[in-house]
Amino acid sequence: MSYLQIRNVWKTYGDNVVLEKINLTIAQGEFCTLIGPSGCGKSTFLRMLMGQDTPSKGSILLDGKPISNEPDSDRGVVFQKYALFPHLKALENVMLGLEMEKSPLLGKVFGATRRKMKAEAMEMLESVGLAHSADKYPSELSGGMQQRLSIAQALVKKPKILLLDEPFGALDPGSKADMHVLVQGLWKKYGLTIFMVTHDVKEAFELGTRLLVFDKVRNDPHSPNAFGAIIVNDIKLDKNKQKNMGEDHVGINETISE
Amino acid sequence: MRLINLDAGRFSPLLKILPFVILGLIYWIAADARHAANPDDKLLPTFEVIADAVVMMTTEVDELTEEPILFTDTVASLKRIGEGLGISVIIGLFFGIIQGTLPIVRSLLSPFSAAISLIPPIAILPILLIIFGLEEPAKVALIVIGVTPFLIRDTQQRALEIPEELLIKVQTLGASTWQIILRVVLPHVLPRLLDALRLSLGAAWLFLITAEAIASSEGLGYRIFLMRRYMEMDVIFPYVIWITFLAYMMDLMLAILIRKAFPWYRKEK
């Protein structure tokens, strides 16, 4: 049940407390959406899950083991931008993760292995609807297509958890809606465990099974950095009764606008 | 219409040649005027005299190599500059990448290479001459010393410019440091290194001609400085134009190479 455990995690930079005593237990297959005002530690939290940052206190366990303190293939990531390799075509971008595993020395494979790998990567491209753009460079793709590619690139490694850092923040509403359908579909298809930071409250409610609201509750006007943010709300979203979340919704909005 | 919105349109090719034509005309008039006053003038030889000199340099055979003098000089100079730039690129790529990618190496070497890059290369030419004598290595070494620090620093900077997101992403794809260097840093840095190389062509030619002027027995720079003693402007002028042309062709070829070998590079921006 407890796939990812976060035990009393604090993050401080010098005197600046960013996050305080975060405790969470996440089950496999959960889709967590993280919201909260800017600068309240959502991204810091995600960075710690990623291994880009280490907790100042406390521990994070994935599958019973402490997570590595540098990024690895247990954790896939999709950033808002800059996350595709500009010198590789779409298909090669997806193949890269597979190649790294198979060829420690060159990071590149040839012959029959390559053909097999291409087929696997192609399948992944198809599942994000990019099969027709396999031969294009990232710069030739639209914003929405780039994010699809970025997701395919992460998923091909079958990460234990997938971290999405405001993945659709730069997309137009139409592409965003398409991406929601896509992510929902992939989440169900592959049984993914997802963490997604977003600024879009509606998106957070629509996509998640669990909504985590970050905010600072204590504030000392004389020393604004003395207290960090905590998780002020941890809401289970029942996917079958989505209409019932009206009450919670109001509460959340109030918390955020404070 | 505002001047900033006015472009040359179909006159554009004409405008591009115009400064060259004007310069030629001015020269022609000046040479003509001097020759009217003194038929033996050597300072501004007429086009006929220059053409004769070019024919002489391209047909008259050098005693040592049994090739025309211009050919011998060109081969000697291109060999030096090619070797010099080749070595510079390899060193620049190696140190630029490890300094840009590995923080420990950067701490160790970055201030050092910054300091080295401030040594005026010509100031150590005497040292090179003492060490290597008047042989080839001294000339090649001057080019290497003149160009490499810039290439190292530029490559380091380009490697540091790789977005952090990309480096995180490739780690989540399971890449080792070596794989990251090979599959991400190297492709990112290579076209930019060639761009930097284009910028350092001017410096490379400067160092080549300096070295050849001081210690050499053939080469384009050597010939120009040799001819200066006899005030043979009819040889010096075409040599200068020839050097400029060679430098321009090298630049053009690098530009084509970058475009062909890294089709994604210009699109990226």
Image (cartoon, grey):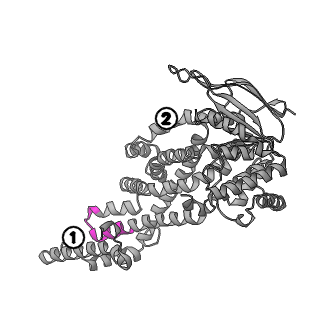
Give the chain of mark 2: B
Local packing at callout 1 (Cα closer than 10 Å; few below 14, some 14-19, many 20+) is some
Quadrant for the N terminus of chain A, please.
top right
Residue at the far left: name it. Answer: B37
**Residue B136's spot in the image, x, y percent?**
48, 54
> How many neighbours does mark 2 have within 10 angstroms: few (below 14), some (14-19), or many (20 or more)?
few
**Which picture quadrant has residue A149?**
bottom right
Q: Which mark is residue A199?
A: none
Q: Is residue B75 visible?
A: no
The residue indicated by pointer 1 is: B42
The residue at the point 77 percent across, 32 percent down is: A67
- Give the prevailing secondary structure in the magenta stretch: helix
Identify residue type, mark 1.
Answer: Lys
Which dot marks residue B111?
2
**What residue appears at the point 30 percent right and 64 percent down from the top-left corner?**
B227
| Alpha carbon separation for disc pair 2 and 1 | 51 Å
Say if B4 sits above or below A175 in the image.
below
* Residue A253 against residue A230 in the figure, above or below: below
Q: Is residue B233 shown in magenta?
A: yes
- Point out the frontmost of discs 2 and 1: 2
Question: What chain letter is assigned to the residue under label 1?
Answer: B
Image spot of residue A165 (x, y percent) = 66, 43
At mark 1, the secondary structure is loop
Return the x and y of residue A144 as percentages of the image width and height. Answer: 65, 57
Q: Specify which label sits upstream in the sequence, 2 or 1.
A: 1
Residue A143 showing in the rendered view? yes
Q: Are marks 2 and 1 on the same chain?
A: yes
Q: Which residues are magenta?
A: B228-242
* Nearer to the camera, A103 or B117: A103
Give left or right: position of B224 versus B130: left
